[in-house]
Amino acid sequence: MPIWFAYTLIVILLLTSGLLTLLVLLHRGKGGGLSSMFGGGVSSNLAGSSVAEKNLDRYTVLVGVIWFACIVGLGLWLKLEVK
């Protein structure tokens, strides 16, 4: 496979890594973990039922799948190139 394939996957991997970090940080805390220790414990009862929260979940899963596919693609590319 050509080298530009690896560079493209690396760029996509970097972009999705940053986006995945932002998306995870946008989620609300679900329990009494560290988020409640720093003032996140006061939340409404409708925390997980809004349309925005469901869309955020979908985007997070989609970006996670793309991130995972880039990791697998880079691994396969390395396996083929090292022969």
Image (cartoon, rainbow, N blue to C red):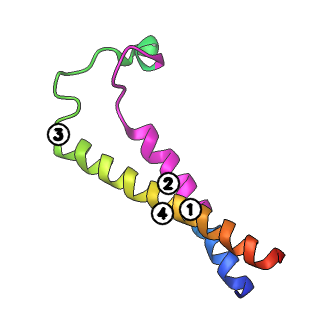
Q: Are marks 2 and 4 in contact (CB under 8 Å)?
A: no
Give the magenta part as a residue range: 13-34
Dot 4 or dot 3: first in sequence order is: 3
Residue that lies at the very extreme toward the bottom in this rendered image: 2
Residue, disc 4: 66
Q: Say which element carries label 2.
A: helix
Q: Which numbered marker is on residue 50?
A: 3
Residue 67 location in percent, x, y? 53, 59
Image-quadrant location for residue 10: bottom right
> What is the spatial separation of the Cα atoms under label 4 and label 1, in whole angstroms?
10 Å
Q: What residue is rendered at 46% in x and 54% in y?
A: 64
Quadrant for the C terminus in the image: bottom right
Dot 4 or dot 1: first in sequence order is: 1
Image-quadrant location for residue 6: bottom right
Dot 2 or dot 4: first in sequence order is: 2
> What is the spatial separation of the Cα atoms under label 1 and label 3, in whole angstroms?
27 Å
Residue, disc 2: 19
